[in-house]
């Protein structure tokens, strides 16, 4: 009886994964992005005000791009969504003067005259010094503004640029599925401090990796060894990577469910570590797999870990009608879950 159940579940799962492969037109990127059919793209309006540079980086971290309108049609489609959902009057868009004053280019390198470019009356005017970044007003006009101003912004992901990582069930191809561990991992070779690394993993719907077994430690060592990183320049600490544990409430605990590190299944500190006497409050791993405490402002490489939901939450969202939900419910009850 059990094997029949398993067989049926396998068949259903195969059916689901075939849908994933065979339907590139499924319109799902992330839960927080809205798909607009006219432009075949996904958009997220970020309400937190940021500088232009921070907005640009935030979109890139989400695997998207700081939005600018391609043409009138996209302008109208996005403006109408914005009008319906948000009250603010201005957003930063993905147009700036990265090279030369007054030479406006999109974040993907197009001259502004090849995209939507209806300036407001008298604009651009460099009214403040260093007016290198472009804002869009609700009336559809553009204005040059100070890049260090803070405004909301919109991130955009085109459907055609979407690559679904089927095994990891996320829209990020940098994650490697490890069958033995049933998890996915990504080595980030842009060094960050622990806090920023934590946020970067979170942005990719993941978390700073937590080691729960010797096998997992071995894999992370292998992943670290095989990632090319010798040529990465800059001021950061080499020899260790940030991981998901920290010193909090007088003990070392993991970022997943705040579990004491000693209960996590892997507690193998490097020789004489931790040596910070509680002053170094963030967790890292030497390249050889041994744990190390570190100052949280120290920049290191880091590894994100992605847990794959057993019956794939995002597929329910991607194929969100009730028929598919039924398939899942059936599969779940057959599997006795
Ligand atoms: C959005 O609202 C502004 C004013 O609040 C209006 O000028 C504009 O036409 C509206 N655009 C769309 C596409 O709804
Ligand atoms: C790590 O790499 C070694 C040698 O390449 C290999 O034998 C081992 O199976 C790998 N371990 C994991 C967990 O990937
Ligand atoms: C991490 O770096 C960011 C800037 O990227 C900074 O704002 C933040 O204060 C730093 N955090 C720590 C703990 O050093
Ligand atoms: Ca201006």
Image (cartoon, rainbow, N blue to C red):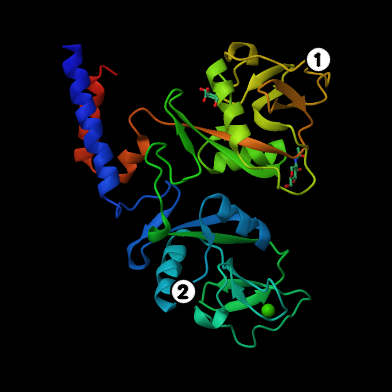
Residue shown at 70% from the left, 74% from the top: 99
> How far from the left and from the top, in percent, is residue 80?
42, 68
Q: Secondary structure at mark 1?
A: loop
Q: State whether residue 99 is above or below residue 273.
A: below
Residue shown at 51% from the left, 81% from the top: 114
> How far from the left and from the top, in percent, is residue 52?
66, 63
Q: State whether residue 25 is above or below residue 136.
A: above
Q: In terms of image quadrants, where is residue 199?
A: top right
Q: Secondary structure at mark 2?
A: loop
Q: Which residue is mark 2?
A: 70
Image check: 99 left or right of 11?
right
Disc 1 or disc 2, which is closer to the eye? 1
Q: How many marks?
A: 2
Image quarter where the C terminus lies is top left
Furthest residue toward bottom = 122
Q: State whether residue 290 is above or below residue 37.
A: above
Residue shown at 44% from the left, 23% from the top: 180
> How far from the left and from the top, in percent, is residue 336?
26, 16
Residue 209 in sight from this viewpoint: no
Foreground pick, 266 / 32: 266
Mark 2: few, some, or many residues within 10 Å (few <14, many ≥20)? Answer: some
**Label 1 vs 2, first from the N-terminus:** 2
Residue shown at 59% from the left, 83% from the top: 120
Foreground pick, 155 / 13: 13
Q: In terms of image quadrants, where is residue 148?
A: bottom right
Residue 311 in sight from this viewpoint: yes
Foreground pick, 121 / 291: 291
> How far from the left and from the top, in percent, is residue 57?
62, 55
Image quarter where the N terminus lies is top left
Q: CA distance from mark 1 to mark 2?
A: 57 Å
Mark 1: few, some, or many residues within 10 Å (few <14, many ≥20)? Answer: few
Q: Which residue is mark 1?
A: 272
């Amino acid at each position: 009886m059990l094997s029949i159940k398993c067989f049926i579940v396998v068949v259903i799962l195969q059916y689901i994964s075939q849908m994933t492969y065979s339907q590139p037109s499924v319109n799902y990127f992330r839960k927080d992005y809205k798909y607009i059919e006219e432009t075949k793209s996904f958009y997220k309006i970020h309400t937190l005000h940021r500088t232009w540079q921070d907005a640009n980086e935030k979109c890139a971290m989400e695997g998207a791009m700081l939005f600018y309108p391609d043409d009138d049609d996209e302008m109208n489609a996005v403006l109408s969504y914005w009008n319906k959902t948000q009250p603010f009057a201005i957003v930063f868009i993905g147009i700036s003067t990265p090279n030369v004053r007054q030479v406006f280019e999109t974040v993907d390198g197009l001259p502004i005259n090849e995209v939507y470019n209806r300036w407001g009356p008298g604009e651009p005017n460099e009214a403040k010094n260093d007016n290198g970044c472009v804002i869009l007003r609700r009336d559809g006009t553009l204005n040059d503004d100070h890049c260090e101003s803070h405004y909301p912004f919109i991130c955009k992901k085109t459907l055609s640029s979407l690559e679904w990582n089927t095994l990891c069930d996320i829209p990020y191809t940098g994650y490697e599925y490890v069958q033995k561990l049933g998890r996915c991992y990504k080595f980030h070779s842009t060094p960050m401090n622990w806090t920023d690394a934590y946020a970067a993993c979170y942005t990719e719907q993941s978390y700073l990796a937590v080691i729960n077994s010797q096998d997992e430690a071995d894999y992370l060592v292998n992943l670290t060894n095989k990632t090319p990183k010798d040529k990465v320049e800059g001021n950061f600490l080499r020899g260790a990577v940030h991981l998901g544990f920290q010193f909090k409430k007088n003990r070392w605990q993991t970022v997943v469910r705040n579990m004491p590190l000693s209960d996590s299944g892997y507690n193998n500190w490097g020789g004489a570590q931790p040596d910070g006497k509680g002053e170094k409050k963030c967790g890292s791993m030497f390249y050889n797999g041994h744990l190390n405490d570190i100052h949280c402002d120290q920049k290191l490489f880091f590894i994100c870990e992605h847990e794959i939901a057993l019956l794939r939450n995002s597929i329910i969202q991607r194929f969100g009608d009730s028929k598919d939900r039924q398939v899942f419910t059936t599969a779940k009850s057959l599997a006795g879950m």
